[in-house]
Image: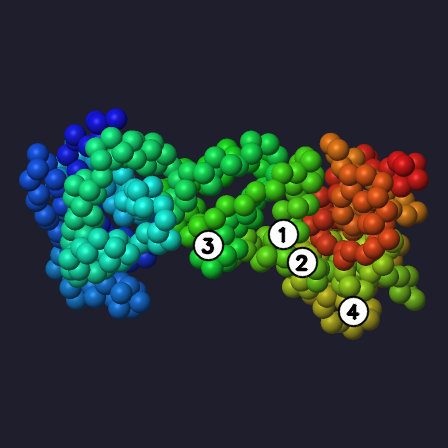
Amino acid sequence: MTSLTDRPLAFVDLETTGSRASVDRITEIAIVTLIDGETHAWSQLVNPERRIPEFIVRLTGISDEMVAGAPTFAEIAADVRQRLDGCVFVAHNARFDYGFLKNEFRRVGLDLRAPVLCTVKLSRRLYPDDQRHNLDRLIERHGIVRRERHRALGDALAIHDFWQIVAAEQPAELLAATLHEAASKPSLPSWLDATDVDDIPDGCGVYLFFGENELPLYVGKSKTLRKRVLAHFAADHRDGKEMSLAQQVRRIETIKCAGEIDALLCESRLVKELQPTHNRQLRRNRECCAWRLVERADGHWRPELVHARDLERGRQQSLYGLFSNSRQANEALRKLVREHALCPTTLGLESGTPGKPCFAHQIGRCRGACTGKESPRQHGLRLQQALAELRLQTWPFAGPALLAEGEVWHVIDHWCHLGSARDESELAELLADGDAAFDRDTYRILVKHVGKMRPLRAAA
């Protein structure tokens, strides 16, 4: 218990060009050491070898001109490492500072390993009734001398002063126990309490990350919820996106699911409802489109683009897709045309004179459907073969079907997920409502399990 308090302490603060440890760089570093009761303060401007964004200049006052003649981190790395050697790494929101230094050391072929103490976590445990634990609040709460804020040395000294006040005010046993608890789970962002993770179940489900003002940040799913959530925070030193996400998380919410299908459907639905800032692929696709083959009067087949809103959910034959937008659909079709030597003029992708060879035919990339060398029937068959892998499966039932998973029934109608029921009354409610929009991601999830579905009457 007392080993942490007996060791030398290094109070560290950094100023940087941004918030991504894997991309941004340090502009200033301060280390205030407390060894055998003696305090020594050191700070150094650092040339980040890149432009400092204007909003960072406004926040810190550190400009490109100020760091132009400063040493690079590579030039001071050995000195920084020596100052930290043997010390407990203490910082406010320590994950940020420790992550940046670890990446800077890695760039010059060195490693940073030190026990870490976050003063945000320490403040939360010692002063649980206070709603805020940022550095400004600590300065205000304890009457700490306010030095130059958002400069490395001023902030490092404020952290040092907070520690000195806490060490003088708190009973030794309570402080030792609190330090042990605060340092025992270094993988969590400092803004999260340990109970936020302790309450996460181990089974299958969906997790939601929320930021300031309940802003939805990210929705994910996993067969092992607790392990997956912790993996986000364990990776943030190396991955810029994970680092950014970890810095923003303020609250975690989880939803237990009946199984993997339930989790996939729940994740897809919540992403579209909440529009989290860190989710990309599942966000908007209700305006998706597909190619439909139409036979013309001359016997040639031509693809026409149709949108999901114009389709009778899962009832049409000869649909190929689905695509997020018309540009993606056209790119996919043109790629198939090139790969299979189809005629772009016959398919309506390029203009041309009837009976005249298209440009692709002139350069040997079309088999001559445009000139009659290839019959409409043969060209149509090759077109269908080229599109075969993109063909959408027609809904195989006359009405709704049930997909059993664990103790729930997923109610599906023409690839639309009406909801999940645990008993007959919930099932009746879903069928009475019976309305859901077609969704590309829902289709892709459900089509893989069509073999397990049963028509509603047979399943009941």
Q: Amino acid at mark 2?
A: Asn
Determine the secondary structure under disc 3: loop
**Labels 2 and 4 touching (C-beta < 8 A):** no
Q: CA distance from mark 3 to mark 2?
A: 25 Å
Image location of residue 146, percent across then percent down: 17, 60
Q: Amino acid at mark 3?
A: Gly
Determine the secondary structure under disc 1: helix
Q: Amino acid at mark 4?
A: Lys
Which image quadrant is residue 124 in? top left
Q: Which residue is mark 4?
A: 356
Residue 88 at least partly seen: yes
Q: Amino acid at mark 1?
A: Leu
Q: Residues within 10 Å of mark 2 (few under 14, many from 20)?
A: some
Q: Which residue is mark 2?
A: 285
Q: CA distance from mark 3 to mark 4?
A: 62 Å
Residue located 63% across and 52% down the image: 270
Q: Which residue is mark 1?
A: 270
Q: Which residue is mark 3?
A: 211
Compared to residue 153, the image places residue 396 above or below, namely: above
